[in-house]
Amino acid sequence: MDIEKMSMNMSQTQLVDAVSTKVLSMAMDMAEQGGAGLVEMMEESMMEMPEVPGLGTNLDLKI
């Protein structure tokens, strides 16, 4: 393999690595935003629940 082909292969490999890293970074950012939105939504739903004494303290099981 000559130097020119090796250089082209290395450049292509570097480009593929750079693009893959960028896509992964974007996916991680989107997942982080989605997680933050989910946490915010859960916190809001907790604030909306009326305070009822004893709510959620008992669990009925039938075996």
Image (cartoon, rainbow, N blue to C red):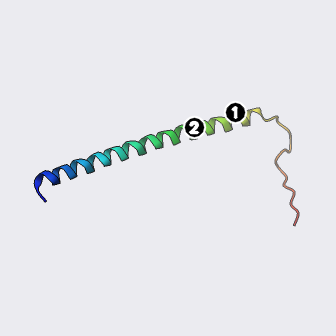
Element carrying mark 2:
helix
- Position of the C terminus, as image quadrant, is bottom right
Q: Residue at x 60, y 36 (%)?
A: 37
Q: Residue furthest left?
A: 2
Residue 36 versus residue 23: which sits nearer the camera? Answer: 23
Q: Residue at x 25, y 48 (%)?
A: 12
Left/right of residue 41 with respect to residue 25 in the rendered view:
right
Query: Which corner quadrant of the image does residue 19 belong to?
Result: top left
Element carrying mark 1:
helix
Left/right of residue 61 with respect to residue 28 in the rendered view:
right
| Marking on residue 36 | 2
Return the x and y of residue 5 as percentages of the image width and height: 16, 53
Number of dots carrying numbers? 2
| Marking on residue 35 | none
Left/right of residue 33 with respect to residue 50 in the rendered view:
left
Q: Earlier in the sequence, mark 2 or mark 1?
A: 2
Q: Residue at x 47, y 43 (%)?
A: 27
Q: Residues within 10 Å of mark 2 (few under 14, many from 20)?
A: few
Determine contact: label 2, label 1, CB under 8 Å: no
Residue 1 versus residue 23: which sits nearer the camera? Answer: 1
Q: At label 1, which amino acid type do we have?
A: Glu
Q: Which residue is mark 1?
A: 44
Return the x and y of residue 6 as percentages of the image width and height: 16, 54
Return the x and y of residue 14 as percentages of the image width and height: 26, 48
Report the Cα–Cα distance between label 2 and label 1.
12 Å
- Position of the N terminus, as image quadrant, is bottom left
In the depicted structure, whether residue 7 falls above or below residue 53: below
Q: At label 2, which amino acid type do we have?
A: Ala
Return the x and y of residue 31 as percentages of the image width and height: 52, 42
